Amino acid sequence: MVIDSHCHLDFEGIAEHLPEVLARAAAADVRLMVSISSRVARFGNLCRIAEANPAVFCTVGTHPHNAHEEPDVTAEELARLARHPKCVGIGEAGLDYHYDLSPRAAQAKGFRVHIDAARRSGLPIVIHSREAEDDTVAILEEEMRAGAFVPLLHCFTSAARLAHAAVNLGGYVSFSGILTYKSAADIRGTAAALPLDRILVETDAPYLAPVPYRGKPNEPAYVVKTLAALAELRGLPVEEMARITSDNICRLFSKVPRTAPETAAA
């Protein structure tokens, strides 16, 4: 069994043909997937997708791009919404200094609110960090001193020191299709160096399709290409890497079952 730890099934490019996307995922043995929230205002729709599909779970949160659009979201509200049985995490939240679509102060405030929600709920926080390594590490270390939580760096593209800092804080690191790109030697180096029990795979669908699908809309079925690249990098059989990453995902997202629902392939 393979698990896609991060996709966006409610986004354009996937949502309009979701049954076919889920069928192709099942055919590729991608039996479970976590669809990640980008806006709390759209959480109801994301929940409906998860409720209607046994293979799908979700998170709740506000993407840093949208932090200025939802400035009044509280940790209490996030923790309350996260009680939904199919909600397995908080986020994605964090810092994006590449696009700066939201003011940095709003991003930092939202990041800290989501960390507080992770503490309150006992669920992991899915973190988006792009070109913001120093501030991401600083916030993680400061907030960890205020109370424990479990961080997950998704779609890792940053300097290796951020990955090692997250792992040292008890966190996890997830790799997307970027791992298969020729230009991603540094990311492969990080993936090769991290402890095996702290690494995950994802698609970030509909974005960042792996080779040989690069440039096309991504979907959960394609996570097997990233998994194969990671297995080759670590010198392990694909089946063993599938077991390792699935175990890691289920340990991190404790509400995700360790066996796929029988109806997931329907």
Image: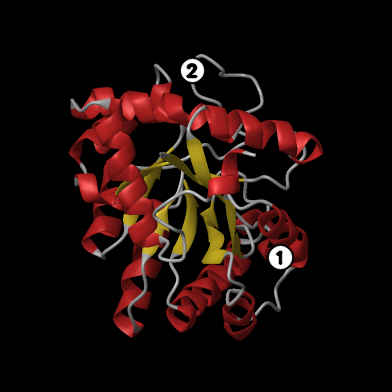
Residue annotated with mark 1? 68
How dense is the environment of label 1, judged by Cα within 10 Å: few (below 14), some, or many (20 and up)? Answer: some
Q: Residue furthest right?
A: 16
Q: Residue 126: percent from the left, percent from the top?
A: 48, 59
Instruction: Tell me, for residue 211, which label it has, or none.
Output: 2
Q: Quadrant of residue 148?
A: bottom left
Which residue occupies 29% across, 30% down? 239
Q: Is residue 35 visible?
A: no
Left or right: 180 with respect to 104?
A: left
Q: Residue 262: percent from the left, percent from the top?
A: 54, 47
How dense is the environment of label 2, judged by Cα within 10 Å: few (below 14), some, or many (20 and up)? Answer: some
In-front residue for pair 3/134: 3
Q: Residue 156: percent from the left, percent from the top?
A: 41, 42
Which residue occupies 45% across, 48% down? 154
Screen quadrant of the C terminus = top right
In primary-sequence order, the first of circles 2 and 1 is: 1
Where disc 2 sits, the SS reads loop
Left or right: 216 with respect to 172?
A: right
Left or right: 36 with respect to 12?
A: left
Q: Quadrant of residue 167?
A: bottom left
